[in-house]
């Protein structure tokens, strides 16, 4: 989308607005989390009731919630395992795990 504006001194200025969210960093590669999906899965599988996988990806608040509720009464733990395996689990910055 391009808009053309005229300045006070009579010059024409073109302004291009690109609102496409492509999740691409400055290097031109897709942004992914520095956290590994398989490490998160192992932590979730073995220590998910204590929220270890949530602490690993930087989600300290929900990590504490899992710690004191036994992994979200094991329902949250089970949902997280499925989300990690399907690739939809994200870190604190909302980036997909690599």
Image (cartoon, rainbow, N blue to C red):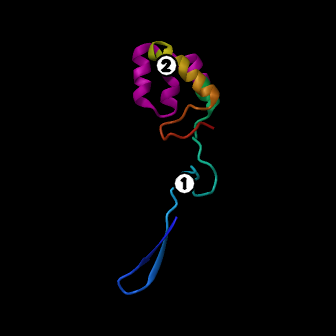
Place of residue 37 in the rendered image (x, y in percent of width and height, measured from the top left): 62, 31
For label 1, the crowd category at 10 Å Cα-Cα, with few meaning under 14, some 14 to 19 and many 20 or more, is few
Pick whichever, 6 or 95, lies toward us.
6
> On the rendered structure, is 73 left or right of 30?
left
Residue 60, by quadrant, is top left
Please name the residue that numbered disc 1 is placed on: 20
Q: Is residue 4 above or below residue 82?
A: below
Earlier sequence position, callout 2 versus callout 1: 1
Q: Secondary structure at mark 2?
A: helix
Place of residue 83 in the rendered image (x, y in percent of width and height, measured from the top left): 58, 26
Dominant SS in magenta: helix
Q: Secondary structure at mark 1?
A: loop
State which quarter of the image contains the C terminus.
top right
Residue numbers of the magenta segment: 42-70
Q: Calculate the distance from the C-alpha at mark 2 to the C-alpha at mark 1.
A: 33 Å
> On the rendered structure, is 3 left or right of 41?
left
Query: For residue 76, which numbered disc appears in the image?
Result: 2
């Amino acid at each position: 989308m391009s808009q053309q504006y005229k300045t006070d001194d009579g010059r024409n200025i073109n302004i291009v607005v690109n609102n496409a969210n492509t999740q691409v960093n400055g290097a031109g590669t897709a942004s992914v989390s520095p956290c590994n999906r398989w490490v998160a899965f192992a932590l979730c599988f073995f220590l998910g009731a204590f929220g270890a996988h949530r602490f690993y990806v930087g989600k300290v608040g929900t990590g504490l919630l899992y710690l004191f509720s036994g992994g979200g009464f094991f329902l949250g733990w089970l949902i997280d395992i499925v989300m990690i395996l399907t690739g939809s689990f994200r870190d604190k910055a909302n980036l997909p795990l690599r």
